[in-house]
Image: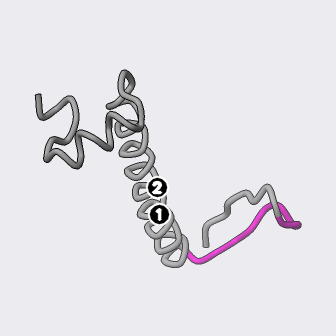
């Protein structure tokens, strides 16, 4: 058995079998890494076109270019 602390549910100290905890942590890590990856992509996309207006981005897209990285 392993103990861990929950800040949301009373009682705050929980006990769980080690195998279950490993499964929970593994699933949580995957969810966290996917969220982090999506956040990084969103940040890089939003900073990629800092000097471009939406109209410019749209025009570049329709002309077959993809923005600054294509130049």
- State yes or no: residue 42 in magenta: no
Q: Position of residue 66 (x, y in %)?
A: 19, 42
**On screen, 57 above or below 8?**
above
- Tell which of 23 and 70 is nearer to you: 70
Contact check, label 1 and label 2, Cβ < 8 Å: yes
For the N terminus, the image quarter is bottom right
Q: Name the spot of residue 33 as percent of width and height, x first.
A: 41, 55
> Which residues, given as a range, are shown in magenta?
9-17
Residue 10 vs residue 33: left or right? right
Residue that appears at 32% across and 38% down: 57
Q: Residues within 10 Å of mark 1 (few under 14, many from 20)?
A: few
> x, y percentage for residue 23?
47, 74
Secondary structure of the residue carrying numbered label 2: helix
Is 17 situated left or right of 34 in this image? right
Residue of label 2: 35
Element class at badge 1: helix
């Amino acid at each position: 058995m392993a103990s861990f602390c929950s800040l949301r549910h009373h009682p705050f100290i929980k006990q769980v079998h080690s195998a279950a905890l490993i499964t929970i942590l593994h699933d949580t890590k995957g969810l966290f890494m996917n969220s982090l990856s999506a956040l990084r992509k969103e940040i890089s996309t939003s900073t990629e076109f800092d000097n471009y207006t939406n109209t410019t981005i749209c025009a570049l897209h329709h002309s077959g270019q993809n923005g600054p990285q294509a130049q």
